[in-house]
Image (spheres, rainbow, N blue to C red):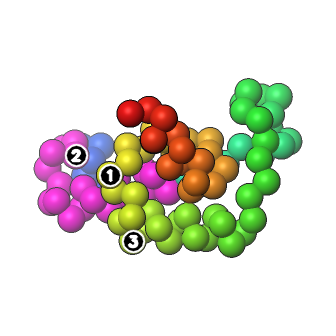
């Protein structure tokens, strides 16, 4: 539903609450694009092993708003949330 509104009207027409949800959802999508060993050849990213527990912890942190201050580009192809924090810290 929100995707349709965004496609037609853009993010500007969303309420602040909806914008926050969309931003968190985008971060989750990028966060779940973890660098897998089997995809190293096609993605160019070194594979990383991340436990299910780490992934769930990271997901929960994103959903709860703990990463709202971090731009979404820092979530792409990172193994764990610690990698996200490291990427953000080194970009400053």
Q: Residue 30: x, y in percent?
A: 53, 47
Q: Which residue is mark 3?
A: 64
Q: Counting other residues with Cα less than 10 Å from the Cα at mark 3, is it few (<14), some (14-19), or many (20 or more)? A: few
Position of the C terminus, as image quadrant, is top left
> Who's the residue at 32% across and 62% down the image?
21
Label whose residue precedes the other's in the sequence (2 or 3): 2
Label whose residue precedes the other's in the sequence (1 or 2): 2
Label whose residue precedes the other's in the sequence (1 or 3): 3
Position of the N terminus, as image quadrant, is bottom left
> Is 92 situated above or below 15?
above
Which mark is in front, 1 or 2? 1
Residue 25 included in the magenta stretch of the image: yes
Residues rendered magenta in the picture: 9-28
Q: CA distance from mark 1 to mark 2?
A: 18 Å
Q: Which residue is mark 1?
A: 69
Q: Is residue 1 visible?
A: no
Secondary structure of the residue carrying tag 2 is helix
Q: CA distance from mark 2 to mark 3?
A: 21 Å
Q: Residue 65: x, y in percent?
A: 36, 65
* Quadrant of res 52: bottom right
Query: Total label count?
Result: 3
Q: CA distance from mark 1 to mark 3?
A: 12 Å
Which mark is in front, 1 or 3? 1
Q: Which residue is mark 2?
A: 11
């Amino acid at each position: 539903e929100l995707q349709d509104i965004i496609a037609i009207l853009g993010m500007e027409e969303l309420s602040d609450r909806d914008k926050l949800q969309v931003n968190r959802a985008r971060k989750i999508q990028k966060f779940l694009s973890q660098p897998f060993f089997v995809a190293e050849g096609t993605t160019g990213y070194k594979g990383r092993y991340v436990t299910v527990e780490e992934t769930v912890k990271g997901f929960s942190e994103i959903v709860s708003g703990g990463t709202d201050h971090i731009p979404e580009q820092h979530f792409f192809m990172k193994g764990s949330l610690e990698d996200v924090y490291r990427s953000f810290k080194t970009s400053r």
